[in-house]
Image (cartoon, rainbow, N blue to C red):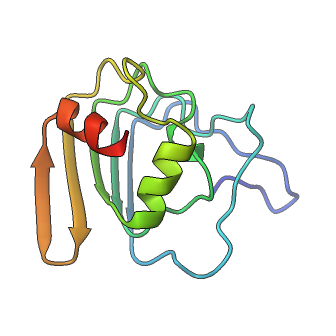
């Protein structure tokens, strides 16, 4: 998704919505260099699988654009969010909607403030 067959990083400069379905927990998770922001225009992220990267790749370079987040949240994802301080205070000023699922039968809609407190 973020690498060309030749190993070069791919950036999607106009991608505003991204939905990932299915289970991506198939071993090692990729990461890209810290200077790469593959999804800089992302406004709406729906992630219905385990988090697909080993680091904060999905949230890089779009903190001033991301408005809606809908994702599964497991212990590994929470650890990653905390480790990389993805949702530190004031970092996502346009984030208006957060919907998390922490097990297959549970859907929780949180205020942005409650979500930020939860992951930090």
Q: Residue at x 31, y 56 (%)?
A: 71
Residue 2 lies, in percent from the top left, at 67, 52
Quarter of the rendering occupied by the N terminus: bottom right
Q: Residue at x 88, y 58 (%)?
A: 6
Task: Name the residue furthest bottom.
Answer: 26
Question: Number of marks in the image?
Answer: 0
Please state if 39 lies on the left or on the right of 120 as rendered: right
Please state if 23 lies on the left or on the right of 95 as rendered: right
Q: With respect to residue 26, does 89 lie above or below?
A: above
Residue 29 lies, in percent from the top left, at 64, 67
Please state if 66 lies on the left or on the right of 15 as rendered: left
Residue 64 lies, in percent from the top left, at 42, 19
In-front residue for pair 116/104? 116
Q: Residue at x 48, y 44 (%)?
A: 82
Quarter of the rendering occupied by the C terminus: top left
In-front residue for pair 16/86? 86
Q: With respect to residue 105, does 37 lie above or below?
A: above
In-front residue for pair 90/39? 90
Q: Residue at x 37, y 22 (%)?
A: 89
Residue 27 lies, in percent from the top left, at 64, 80
Q: Toward which corner of the image does residue 3 lie, by quadrant?
A: bottom right
Q: Toward which corner of the image does residue 107 lie, by quadrant?
A: bottom left
Q: With respect to residue 56, does 19 lie above or below?
A: below
């Amino acid at each position: 998704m973020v690498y060309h067959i030749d190993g070069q990083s791919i950036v999607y400069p106009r991608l505003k919505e991204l939905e990932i379905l299915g289970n991506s927990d198939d071993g090692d998770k990729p990461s890209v260099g810290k200077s790469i922001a593959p999804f800089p225009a992302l406004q709406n992220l729906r992630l219905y699988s385990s988090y697909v990267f080993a680091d904060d790749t999905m949230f890089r370079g779009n903190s001033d654009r991301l408005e809606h987040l809908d994702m599964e949240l497991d212990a590994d994802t929470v650890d990653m969010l905390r480790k990389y301080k993805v949702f530190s205070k004031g970092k996502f000023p346009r984030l208006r909607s957060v919907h998390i699922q922490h097990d297959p039968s549970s859907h929780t809609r949180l205020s942005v403030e409650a979500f930020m407190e939860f992951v930090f």
